[in-house]
Amino acid sequence: MQVKSKGEQERELVRTNPLDYSLFNLEALFRLATLGEYVGVDCWKVTAKDGGGLYAALDYLAPYTDPAKPWPMTEVKPADRRLLLPMLAQAYAQDKDVKYKSLLGKFYGDGPELWRLLWPYDRQTPVKPANSR
């Protein structure tokens, strides 16, 4: 797995559009993890030797769901940060981590995207503090 311990996807970070490529690659890894569920392989918990995995990669990118947070690297064209939303929703459905729910609460919005049917976000349930899991 090319995800480092802090969640960087180093091969994507050296490309012309590092955020876009990181999102694209992470989406592919999420799809593989979803397919793995159908054959009894839990890819969600797979980690590299240095500790990198799907959640680390999502955690690295998650703050950039906020369009006001600048991406620290140069890009030829800006990435569509809304691509993080289905991954946050799916990760929250898997893990119930409050940090994903918090980001969804801020940036979920409305729209006809199919992923909203697959991983619906419950706007009625308040976000609890992280230590009350």
Image (cartoon, rainbow, N blue to C red):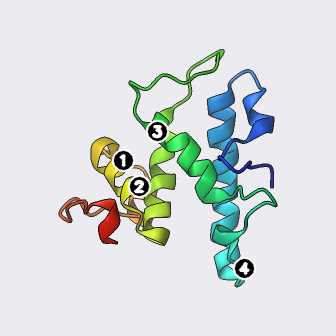
Tell me whether circle 4 and circle 3 mark residues in contact (CB < 8 Å): no
Quickly name the residue at label 2: 100
Identity of the amino acid at label 1? Leu
10 Å crowding of disc 4: few (<14), some (14-19), many (20+)? some
Q: Which of marks 3 and 1 is nearer the N terminus?
A: 3
Q: Distance between the residues labelled 4 and 2?
A: 23 Å
Identity of the amino acid at label 4? Val
Identity of the amino acid at label 2? Tyr
Quickly name the residue at label 4: 41
Tell me whether circle 2 and circle 1 mark residues in contact (CB < 8 Å): yes
Q: Which mark is residue 103?
A: 1
| Viewer-side label of 4, 2 | 2
10 Å crowding of disc 2: few (<14), some (14-19), many (20+)? many
- Horizontal side of residue 40 vs 79, given as left or right: right
Q: Residue 63 carries which label?
A: 3
Q: Assign a secondary structure to mark 2.
A: helix
Q: Quick check: 113 above or below 8?
A: below
The N terminus lies in quadrant:
bottom right
Q: In which quarter of the image is residue 53?
A: bottom right
Q: Earlier in the sequence, mark 4 or mark 2?
A: 4
Q: Which residue is drawn at 57% across and 50% down?
A: 58
Q: Assign a secondary structure to mark 1.
A: helix
